[in-house]
Image: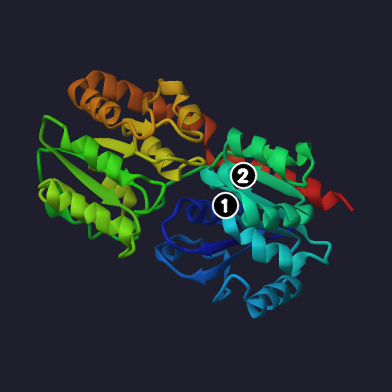
Amino acid sequence: MKVLHIIDSLALGGAERIAVNFSNALAEKGIETHLCVQRESGSLKDFINSNVSVFYLNKTSTFDLKAMFRLRKYIKNHKIDIIHAHSSSFFIATLAVFFTSKKLIWHDHNGNRVNCRGKELFILKFLSVRFNFIFSVNEELKIWAVKNLYVKKKCILKIHNFVYFEKDKNENLQDKLFDTESFKIVCLANLRHPKNHLLLLSSVRELGFDYQLYLVGQYNNDEYYQAIIRFIKKNNLVQKVYILGQRNDIKSILEQCDLGVLSSESEGLPVSLLEYGLAKLPVVCTNVGECSTVLGGGEYGLLVDKNDVKGMSEAITKIYSDKTFAEKTALNFYENIMKNYSKNTIIEYVISIYNSLLQKK
């Protein structure tokens, strides 16, 4: 079996991390694994298993025909059996194998996909005739795919994300930021829509205790980022909120924090939520996507409605003020992650689906 995963970049995003995790796990199982990166490299390149063959496509536009033919040639030359396309990579993957017998799986990580309309939906629907399987990261996305795409219901499955920590590749943690007795809050999410960092900032502004908030994730100098900067300055949060950007020392950061938060307006199944659990952090999270399921409906962490500033602030205060509750939920969450989102369980299931596809003519 030869498997090719396709992802847009190697930036520290959720879909990107899952693509790397799957590639690494398959390679560890002795499966010949390839990873095609469409546009750019990124911090995740340091975490790719040496047994994974990485192919940089250098795609320059959505309709880059030369890139499509390069991908097609790579698939042919390496005799790839299964193409596993993550998120928006379905487009070039489908074009590259449209008139071949290669097996194609689309892995949908985008929780906002349910709002897909117009031209975007038309293209996805048309290309879906070539999908052999769809992996959806939550139940809502699975139901949406069943209703909207040309794939048999039995071939649309909900597949849990999984996460595991390798050794941090960057040990130069900014210790000065963490050398404090303040309550340390971390938000591991790229600074972009729909992560809704302004909700989080509005919530921590109302806190009645000493805290520091660390925003970890990729950002661009765009309006979303500038709105965050303006809010921090206007509300005198410069000594409270730190934007750390992309980091390769996630494990070290999480280990030094007291609470993990997510304030998104929509999600699939956020990898950062799983990483909080693996780091044994208590969690406050908006009730979107698969977050409620992961948190056991609130048994393993506190859920608040999206856009609820007061609810978010009260939940953070609950974790701060009730140490026994925080420790209990964090431990229960860790045990849930180890039981239901372990690498071996999920990767064995995915391999079984790969094998079933190859058995079909």
Residue 299 spot, x, y in % from top left: 41, 20
Q: Can you tell which quarter of the image residue 168 is in?
A: bottom left
Residue 218, visible in the rendered structure: yes
Residue linked to disc 2: 347
- The residue at 23%/47% (across/down) is 214
Q: Residues at badges 2 and 1 in contact (C-beta under 8 Å)?
A: yes
Query: Which SS class for mark 2?
Result: helix
Type of residue at label 1? Phe
Q: Can you tell which quarter of the image residue 158 is in?
A: top right
**Residue closer to the observer: 102 or 127:** 127
Q: Is residue 154 left or right of residue 183?
A: right
- The residue at 11%/31% (across/down) is 209
Q: What's the CA distance linking mark 2 and mark 1?
A: 7 Å
129 in relation to 342, above or below? below
Q: Which circle's residue, 2 or 1, is located before the other in the chain?
A: 1
Type of residue at label 2? Ile
Q: Is residue 192 left or right of residue 209?
A: right
Mark 2: give few (<14), some (14-19) or many (20+) Cα within 10 Å: many
- The residue at 34%/23% (across/down) is 329
Residue 158, visible in the rendered structure: no
Q: Residue furthest front?
A: 118
Q: Quadrant of the N terminus?
A: bottom right
Residue 39 spot, x, y in % from top left: 52, 71
**Residue closer to the observer: 10 or 125:** 125
Query: Which SS class for mark 1?
Result: helix
The dot on residue 22 is 1
37 in relation to 218, above or below? below
359 in relation to 220, above or below? above
Q: Is residue 260 left or right of residue 153?
A: left
Residue 264 spot, x, y in % from top left: 39, 41
